[in-house]
Image (cartoon, helix red, strand yellow):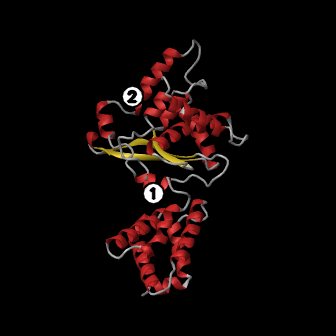
Amino acid sequence: MLLTNVVNDSVTAAEVLAERLPETLSGTAKRVYQALLIPAIENAKERGYVNPSRVTFHCPAEIISTSLGISRMSLWRAVQVLRAEGLVDNRAQKARLSCRGGAVRNTGSVWQIRLTPNHGSRCKLSYEELRHVWRPGFNDEVRQGRGSHAAVKAARARHALARPSGVTYKSNSQELDLELLLKHSVDSKKHTPSVDSLVCNKPKNAVLEVLLDVSSARRGQDTVQRVDLAAQALATALADHASVNFYRRLVWGLLRASQRGTDYFSTVYQMAVRAKVDYRESWSKKGGAVFCSRLKETRIWDEVMKT
């Protein structure tokens, strides 16, 4: 593939970031991380992110292993090492095929890549990222025979023609098939970004800062919108999307208390930030449960939630 300057910049950036990896990592793990960085950086550009610390995208594992010229088992072992380091998180995603009588098939994997290898919290896919429909045209791809399996088959045939005599597929080739990798992992600007760019463009914890703006809202529709946004922010930060109505009730209660002269917004914001950090660092498995438990230990619960 004839690389554009933009892609060349992403490849160079990936090489620089990969140099910051711990020396204890294996060569294969470093190659896999460097390869995953390229679509992560390209997706960040396509979506308009500003200095993101991590990027989430969708790509079948077989596309990545074929692009690298390694087996699926080698890729799996390298990913396990990278996950242990907190540099990568991935989960398989499934979809129901109407063209195959409603059969459930694997569309590929959702990947989250940390762009700061020498610092930052561990990668952890959110509920929204896992629930997102990453391949809306999956049915058409399968029906028309242009899915990832067909792409891998064509790529292997291409590689076989270009491979020197005596070199097998399983040889650890240092060449990366960028065309194959980027075609199946980078979203187009023509489509809605897969991850909310508003959140990714904000500094750390900025999404929760909307909670601090609720009390200054104008009466009427502006107040309703800010309350709803704050509730959604709490649910997202604490990975507790099933409790959005609870958070709406909480924010309305905080607003009523503020109008009576007692402002708890700052205190609740700090509690939410702490619970979010605990959840991100795997100190707790349920960020929303920890937040509510701590909230009940304060007088805020009695004054806001019980009145």
Please provide percent x and percent y for residue 295. Answer: 53, 78
On the image, the x and y values in percent for residue 142 come to 32, 35
Disc 1 element: helix
Q: Mark 2 or mark 1, which is nearer the start of the sequence? A: 1
Rendering quarter of residue 29? top right
- Going by the numbered disc 1, the residue's amino acid type is Tyr
The residue nearer to you, when weighing 61 against 266, is 266
Other residues around mark 2 within 10 Å, as few (<14) / some (14–19) / many (≥20): few
Q: Between label 1 and label 2, give the one nearer the viewer.
A: 1
Q: Residue furthest top?
A: 165
**Is residue 101 depicted above or below 126 in this figure?**
above
Query: Which residue corresponds to the image point at 45% horizontal and 51% vertical from the top-left?
Result: 197
Question: Where residue 40 sits: x, y (%)?
Answer: 52, 41
Residue drawn at (48%, 23%) of the image: 2
Q: Is residue 90 visible?
A: no
The label number, if any, that marks residue 108 in the structure image: none
Q: Nearer the viewer, residue 78 or 232?
A: 232
Asked if residue 113 lies left or right of residue 136, the reply is: right
Q: Quadrant of residue 164?
A: top right
Secondary structure, mark 2, is helix
Residue that numbered label 1 is attached to: 127
**Which amino acid is tagged 2?**
Ala
Q: Could you say which is closer to the camera, residue 191 or residue 223?
A: 223
- On screen, 206 above or below 260? above
Left-right relation of 192 to 289: left
Residue drawn at point x = 44 percent, y = 74 percent: 216
Residue carrying label 2: 150
